[in-house]
Image: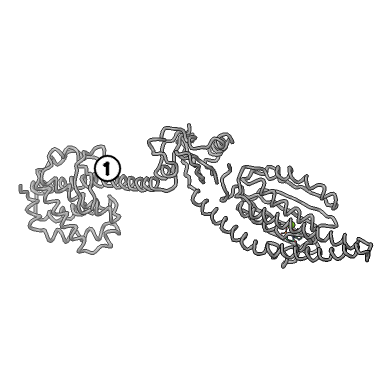
């Protein structure tokens, strides 16, 4: 089909392209102003091609109402593959014109979709691109005026309006379709990435609803607990909780914390796998709420601590064995010395007894003295062996929930006779509302007792012993202060060594044992001391240690 406009474009192509690209560069946004004239010319070539193909197709009436530019509801889907953009674009063509998608229409759609994808990638807005297209309308409009007049000019102007109207409308539709397409694709991609992170995570990631019914169960959860999603989704998450933990109210506390703060953490707790195996886990919970703020359930992220715990235990065990090894070498020495002096004393005693028997001596005073020293040496040997065995046979810690205040209130009274005998004033300063902690009661008391004994022994002339407890930053801090003889810096350093003692009959094992026990609770002991003034021991114990054997 030939129109005066087609004829004009064929004849004045170079002129049109030149004027169009200059007009775009000079009069549109900085996005275009920054581009070289050659690039803009190439763009104008394509645009002109599109104008021509639009002219070739049989045009609908020039004054057909314009479809609204960006309402996707007014669009009919048309699948176009967009190789240049590297994506499959679900395109929408203008409703009403899909029925007669002829060659020219198809080309318009292809052109505008390529343009839309390209412009979108380059960061142009829809308005900027449309303005650049309309510059073409202006340029051609001005160029035709000297060539036509009367009816012919009117016909050319109408054809121009119609062609640009259709291109611009198709561009608007396409641009809006592409934008929403890209948004959906980005969202889908992000969701997929998130999903695969959740799914592939080695941690158990579980969603349970407000009734504690499992709704989502990832691969990590299947690996840790042995249930496949199909076996547990729809069942209560309490299925994983050991009976004694259910009975202890841990879950109620957890749900209360989740309701109040929206988040909760169980630092070290047990769950039961499908095969009945106990699994140590660290668990973090986050509440999910609906738009009105009502809790819909919670995400639980659980990390399997079993392996870490096994390694830590193996390390502790190895350390302890090494220590016991060096200790037994010293132990021989610790026993040989007193046994040497015992046999020396026995020889002396034999001489004494022979003297008495022979009537050379009637006084048994010296013999009694020798006996007493034999007794002392043997007593020390016995204590060393007992302390050593206590050390060597120290079982792995068995953690339970306990209140340190109760532990002290329960055991300290047994020391009252020693306090009275040595005129020691006891001050118990137990922090109020001290949280419970996970600890091995027997062993923790063993450690405290060693510190208390040393404090008592450091105050032979009497003094004040203060025991205080406080909660601080997720730890429990216990201080034992005496007003005794104190220690030099050098002594403080030596004090931790096995068998190092400044006391007659001391074993030198009290401090190393206390240190070992506190270390197995994940805590530490600090010492501050001033000679002649006294000593403070500070025990810092985590509420829930990351190490230690399961309570049984
Ligand atoms: P022992 O009590 O058998 O001597 P320990 O290991 O319990 O062995 O203590 C080692 C040494 O540390 C003690 O002999 C003492 O010199 C010093 N020591 C420990 N606690 C105190 C304290 N509260 N005041 C002064 N010295 C202390
Ligand atoms: Mg001691």
User: In x, y percent, where is residue 366?
Assistant: 89, 63
What residue do we see at 29% from left, 58% from top? 31
Q: Image check: 289 left or right of 520?
A: left
Which residue is more in the foreground, 380 or 495?
380
Residue 552's place in the image compared with 140, above or below, is above
Q: Secondary structure at mark 1?
A: loop
Which residue is more in the foreground, 452 or 371?
371
Disc tally is 1
Quarter occupied by residue 147: bottom left
Q: Image check: 211 left or right of 551?
A: left
User: In x, y percent, where is residue 96?
Assistant: 17, 37
Residue 198's place in the image compared with 259, above or below, is below
Q: Image check: 53 left or right of 215?
A: left
Mark yes or no: residue 104 visible: yes
User: In x, y percent, where is residue 179?
Assistant: 29, 47
| Image quarter for ligand 2 | bottom right
Q: Image check: 48 left or right of 371?
A: left
Residue beneath disc 1: 70
Which residue is more in the foreground, 430 or 271?
271
User: In x, y percent, where is residue 219?
Assistant: 39, 44
Task: Quarter of the image for the C terminus: give it.
Answer: top right
Quarter occupied by residue 481: bottom right
In this picture the colour scheme is one colour
Which residue is more in the foreground, 256 or 444?
444
What residue do we see at 39% from left, 39% from top? 228
Residue sticking out furthest to the left: 1
Q: Could you classify mark 1 by the number of other residues whose Cα lies within 10 Å: few (under 14), some (14-19), or many (20 or more)?
A: some
Residue sticking out furthest to the front: 358
Mark 1 residue CB less than 8 A from any atom of ligand 1: no
């Amino acid at each position: 089909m030939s129109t005066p406009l087609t004829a004009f474009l064929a004849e004045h192509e170079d002129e049109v392209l030149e004027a169009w690209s200059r007009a775009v560069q000079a009069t549109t946004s900085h996005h275009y102003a920054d581009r070289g004239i050659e690039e803009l010319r190439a763009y104008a070539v394509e645009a002109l091609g599109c104008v021509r193909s639009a002219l070739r197709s049989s045009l609908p009436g020039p004054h057909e109402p314009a479809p609204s530019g960006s309402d996707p509801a007014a669009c009919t889907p048309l699948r176009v593959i967009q190789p240049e953009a590297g994506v499959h674009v679900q395109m929408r063509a203008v409703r009403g014109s899909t029925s007669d998608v002829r060659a020219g229409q198809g080309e318009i759609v292809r052109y505008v979709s390529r343009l839309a994808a390209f412009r979108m990638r380059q960061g142009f807005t829809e308005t900027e691109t449309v303005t650049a297209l309309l510059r073409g309308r202006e340029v051609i409009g001005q160029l035709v005026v000297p060539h036509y007049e009367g009816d012919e000019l009117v016909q050319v102007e109408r054809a121009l309006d119609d062609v640009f109207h259709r291109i611009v409308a198709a561009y608007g539709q396409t641009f809006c379709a592409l934008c929403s397409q890209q948004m959906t694709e980005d969202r889908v991609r992000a969701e997929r990435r998130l999903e695969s992170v959740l799914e592939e995570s080695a941690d158990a990631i579980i969603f349970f609803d407000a009734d504690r019914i499992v709704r989502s169960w990832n691969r990590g959860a299947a690996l840790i607990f042995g249930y496949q999603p199909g076996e547990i989704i729809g069942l209560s998450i309490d299925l994983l909780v050991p009976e004694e933990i259910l009975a202890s109210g841990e879950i109620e506390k957890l749900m209360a914390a989740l309701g109040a703060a929206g988040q909760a953490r169980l630092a070290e707790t047990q769950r039961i796998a499908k095969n009945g195996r106990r699994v140590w886990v660290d668990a973090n919970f986050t509440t999910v709420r609906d738009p009105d703020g009502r809790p819909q359930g919670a995400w639980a992220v659980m990390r399997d601590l079993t392996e870490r715990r096994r390694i830590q235990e193996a390390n502790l065990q190895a350390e302890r064995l090494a220590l016991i090894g060096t200790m037994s070498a010293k132990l021989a020495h610790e026993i040989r010395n007193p046994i040497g002096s015992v046999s020396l004393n026995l020889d002396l005693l034999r001489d004494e007894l022979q003297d008495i028997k022979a009537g050379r001596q009637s006084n048994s005073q010296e013999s009694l003295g020798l006996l007493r020293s034999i007794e002392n040496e043997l007593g020390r040997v016995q204590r060393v062996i007992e302390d050593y065995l206590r050390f060597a046979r120290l079982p792995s810690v068995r953690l339970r929930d306990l209140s340190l205040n109760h532990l002290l209130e329960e055991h300290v009274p047994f020391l009252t006779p020693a306090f009275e005998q040595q005129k020691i004033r006891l001050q118990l300063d137990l922090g109020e509302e001290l949280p419970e902690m996970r600890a091995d009661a027997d062993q923790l008391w063993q450690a405290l007792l060693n510190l208390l004994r040393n404090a008592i022994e450091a105050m032979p002339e009497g003094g004040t012993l203060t025991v205080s407890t406080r909660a601080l930053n997720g730890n429990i801090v216990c201080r034992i202060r005496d007003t005794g003889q104190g220690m030099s810096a050098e002594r403080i350093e030596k004090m931790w060594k096995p068998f190092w003692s400044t006391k007659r009959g001391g074993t030198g094992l009290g401090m190393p044992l206390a240190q070992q026990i506190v270390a197995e609770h994940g805590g530490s002991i600090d010492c501050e001391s001033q000679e002649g003034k006294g000593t403070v021991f500070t025990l810092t114990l985590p509420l829930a240690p990351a190490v230690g054997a399961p309570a049984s």
